[in-house]
Image (cartoon, rainbow, N blue to C red):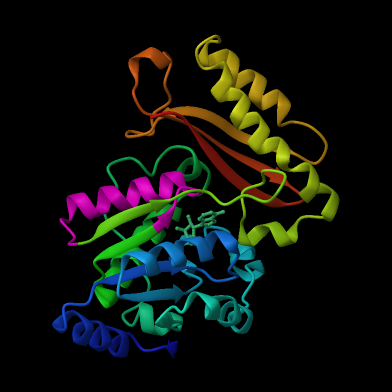
Amino acid sequence: MQLLSKADEVTTLVQVAKSKNLSVGFVPTMGALHKGHISLVRRAKKENDIVIVSIFVNPTQFNDKKDLEKYPRTLDQDIQALKPTKVDIVFAPDVSEIYPDGDKKGSEIDLGGLDKMMEGAFRPGHFNGVAQVVKRLLDIVNPDRLYMGQKDFQQFTIIQHMIDTLHLPVHMVVCPIMREENGLAMSSRNVRLTSTTRSNAGIIYKTLKSAKSKLKTHTIGNINAEAMKSLSTGPFEPVYFEIVDGNTLQPIHDASKHDYIVACTAVWADGVRLIDNHILKS
Ligand code: AMP
């Protein structure tokens, strides 16, 4: 495993690998790695000759500066966690390496309006920052395959849109959500929950599964209202619970008119914003 911090070094290594007809998989992360991230790396290792993991806490996707400051940075631990995966390259650059011309450049990518609802409505500019950093990383790494988690449903949908509209030569692989034993989706932010909140946070997945079981028998309005109620207990405070078309991310009203349906939610707990989703129909 090589630890690199310079973009040029990564680009050159990938060029050499590709000249030998080796395939390249890429897993972008913000570090504080958990089993969810590791599952992406393992999948990438299975499907490619060379795998690169980036660890970069991207400032441009944080609309809340306090959240950026509080974001865990655990590079040494991350490297230890990656060792068993036999990942080939860990790319951990500084901000100046990713944005040598300032962090405004490359932030104006058209996201087709997919960035306006759900997370985007509450975190203005967040997805522009995500698209900006993923585009920059793809330009540096130039992988054959890009691995992203279903955990961030809106994020991977927006990145797929960017890949399609800019005709980027990369294939995206979406990996399933890894969960803690009680169903809480693994997240780098979970360490900031109290142990009681963390053990009760299974309510989020329970509510999502309950929405799935009601899809054929209840109206969408009814499912949403019941979900909001079930998520408003103890320290949990739902921001939104929406049942949307998986392609357009627009809220749906009649499940029978859509082939691909997903329930997405964001919930505050102990000052931590938790997001999760569940595919109801595909
Ligand atoms: P992050 O470090 O939070 O930016 O996440 C890096 C990648 O890991 C993203 O593609 C996430 O969707 C994915 N990821 C985060 N949490 C999970 C999880 N619980 N299961 C699977 N993938 C995840």
**Which residue, as the protein is rendered here, is positioned at the far front?**
46
Residue 82 lies left or right of residue 69; in this view the side is left
Instruction: Please state which of residues 144 and 28 is positioned toward the viewer in this rendering.
Output: 144
Q: Quadrant of the C terminus?
A: top left
Instruction: Please state which of residues 273 and 59 is positioned toward the viewer in this rendering.
Output: 273
Q: Position of residue 33 (x, y in %)?
A: 58, 69
Q: Which residue is at 50% across, 44% downward?
A: 119
Q: Position of residue 27 (x, y in %)?
A: 40, 67
Question: 29 above or below 115?
Answer: below
Residue 7 lies left or right of residue 276; in this view the side is left
Residues in magenta, as a range: 148-169
Q: Is residue 128 magenta?
A: no
Q: Is residue 110 visible?
A: no
Residue 16, quarter of the rendered image: bottom left
Q: Is residue 177 visible?
A: yes
Residue 199 lies left or right of residue 248; in this view the side is right
Q: Which residue is at 31% across, 85% downward?
A: 10
Q: Position of residue 133 (x, y in %)?
A: 37, 67
Instruction: Please state which of residues 32 and 36 is positioned toward the viewer in this rendering.
Output: 36
Instruction: Please state which of residues 65 and 190 is positioned toward the viewer in this rendering.
Output: 190
Question: 125 above or below 219?
Answer: below
Question: 194 above or below 119?
Answer: below
Q: Quadrant of the N terminus?
A: bottom left
Q: Which residue is at 20% across, 50% downward?
A: 164
